Amino acid sequence: MADKIMLCLCLDITEHDLDRAIEEGFTDAETFKRYTAGFMGPCQGKSCMDTILERLAHKTGVDPESLRRPTLRPPAHPVRLGLVAGLGGSDAS
Protein backbone atom coordinates (compact mmCIF):
# COMPACT_ATOMS: atom_id res chain seq x y z
CA MET A 1 0.00 0.00 0.00
CA ALA A 2 2.90 2.41 0.74
CA ASP A 3 3.90 2.34 -2.92
CA LYS A 4 0.52 3.93 -3.76
CA ILE A 5 0.68 6.84 -1.31
CA MET A 6 2.04 9.84 -3.20
CA LEU A 7 4.12 12.32 -1.22
CA CYS A 8 5.43 14.38 -4.15
CA LEU A 9 3.20 14.68 -7.20
CA CYS A 10 5.85 16.52 -9.24
CA LEU A 11 8.39 13.70 -9.06
CA ASP A 12 6.14 10.73 -8.20
CA ILE A 13 7.82 10.11 -4.84
CA THR A 14 5.82 7.63 -2.79
CA GLU A 15 5.73 6.57 0.85
CA HIS A 16 7.62 3.46 -0.29
CA ASP A 17 10.42 5.69 -1.64
CA LEU A 18 10.57 7.41 1.75
CA ASP A 19 10.78 4.04 3.53
CA ARG A 20 13.58 2.92 1.21
CA ALA A 21 15.51 6.16 1.77
CA ILE A 22 15.27 5.70 5.54
CA GLU A 23 16.45 2.08 5.25
CA GLU A 24 19.47 3.34 3.28
CA GLY A 25 20.28 5.83 6.05
CA PHE A 26 18.93 9.03 4.51
CA THR A 27 17.07 10.25 7.59
CA ASP A 28 17.24 14.04 7.30
CA ALA A 29 15.75 16.41 4.75
CA GLU A 30 19.01 17.28 2.96
CA THR A 31 20.13 13.68 2.40
CA PHE A 32 16.58 12.64 1.46
CA LYS A 33 16.59 15.41 -1.16
CA ARG A 34 19.89 14.21 -2.59
CA TYR A 35 18.77 10.55 -2.62
CA THR A 36 15.32 11.08 -4.18
CA ALA A 37 15.50 14.54 -5.79
CA GLY A 38 12.56 15.43 -3.56
CA PHE A 39 11.87 19.16 -3.23
CA MET A 40 13.53 19.71 -6.63
CA GLY A 41 10.51 19.34 -8.90
CA PRO A 42 8.62 22.19 -10.55
CA CYS A 43 7.06 23.26 -7.23
CA GLN A 44 10.47 23.31 -5.46
CA GLY A 45 8.89 21.60 -2.45
CA LYS A 46 6.07 24.10 -2.00
CA SER A 47 3.39 21.40 -2.27
CA CYS A 48 5.20 18.42 -0.73
CA MET A 49 7.84 19.59 1.74
CA ASP A 50 5.61 19.77 4.82
CA THR A 51 4.11 16.34 4.17
CA ILE A 52 7.46 14.68 3.50
CA LEU A 53 9.11 16.26 6.55
CA GLU A 54 6.18 15.24 8.75
CA ARG A 55 6.32 11.64 7.50
CA LEU A 56 10.13 11.57 7.80
CA ALA A 57 9.95 12.81 11.40
CA HIS A 58 7.21 10.31 12.28
CA LYS A 59 9.07 7.34 10.79
CA THR A 60 12.43 8.25 12.36
CA GLY A 61 10.98 9.22 15.74
CA VAL A 62 12.25 12.79 15.81
CA ASP A 63 10.44 16.03 16.48
CA PRO A 64 9.27 17.53 13.16
CA GLU A 65 10.47 20.96 14.30
CA SER A 66 14.01 19.60 14.69
CA LEU A 67 14.28 18.67 11.00
CA ARG A 68 16.04 21.41 9.08
CA ARG A 69 14.53 22.29 5.75
CA PRO A 70 16.82 21.46 2.84
CA THR A 71 18.91 24.15 1.22
CA LEU A 72 17.20 25.76 -1.76
CA ARG A 73 19.62 26.80 -4.46
CA PRO A 74 18.23 29.21 -7.06
CA PRO A 75 20.12 29.90 -10.28
CA ALA A 76 23.11 32.22 -9.83
CA HIS A 77 21.42 34.82 -12.04
CA PRO A 78 18.58 34.87 -14.57
CA VAL A 79 19.50 33.94 -18.14
CA ARG A 80 17.37 34.82 -21.15
CA LEU A 81 16.09 31.78 -23.04
CA GLY A 82 17.26 33.25 -26.35
CA LEU A 83 20.82 33.19 -25.05
CA VAL A 84 20.47 29.57 -23.94
CA ALA A 85 19.01 28.69 -27.35
CA GLY A 86 22.00 30.26 -29.08
CA LEU A 87 20.08 33.15 -30.60
CA GLY A 88 22.65 35.65 -29.39
CA GLY A 89 21.90 38.79 -27.53
CA SER A 90 23.01 39.88 -24.11
CA ASP A 91 22.47 38.04 -20.85
CA ALA A 92 21.96 41.35 -19.06
CA SER A 93 18.47 41.64 -17.66
Image (cartoon, rainbow, N blue to C red):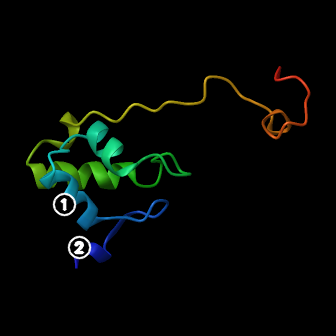
- Asked if residue 69 lies left or right of residue 88, the reply is left
> x and y percent of residue 47 in the render?
46, 54
SS class, disc 1: helix
> In the picture, residue 64 is in which quadrant?
top left
* Number of residues whose C-alpha sits closer than 10 Å to that of mark 2, classed few (under 14), some (14–19) or many (20 or more): few
Dot 1 and dot 2 residues touching (CB under 8 Å): yes
**71 and 31: which one is in front?**
31
- Mark 1 residue type: Asp
- Mark 2 residue type: Ala
- Against 91, residue 84 (above or below) is below
Q: How many marks?
A: 2
> In the picture, residue 29 is in which quadrant?
top left
**50 and 60: which one is in front?**
60
> x and y percent of residue 12 in the render?
42, 65
> x and y percent of residue 90 in the render?
88, 22
- Against 72, residue 64 (above or below) is below
Going 16% across and 52% down the picture, which residue do you hit?
22
- Asked if residue 28 lies left or right of residue 44, the reply is left
Residue labelled with disc 2? 2
Quarter of the figure that contains the C terminus: top right
- Against 91, residue 70 (above or below) is below
Residue labelled with disc 1? 19
SS class, disc 2: helix
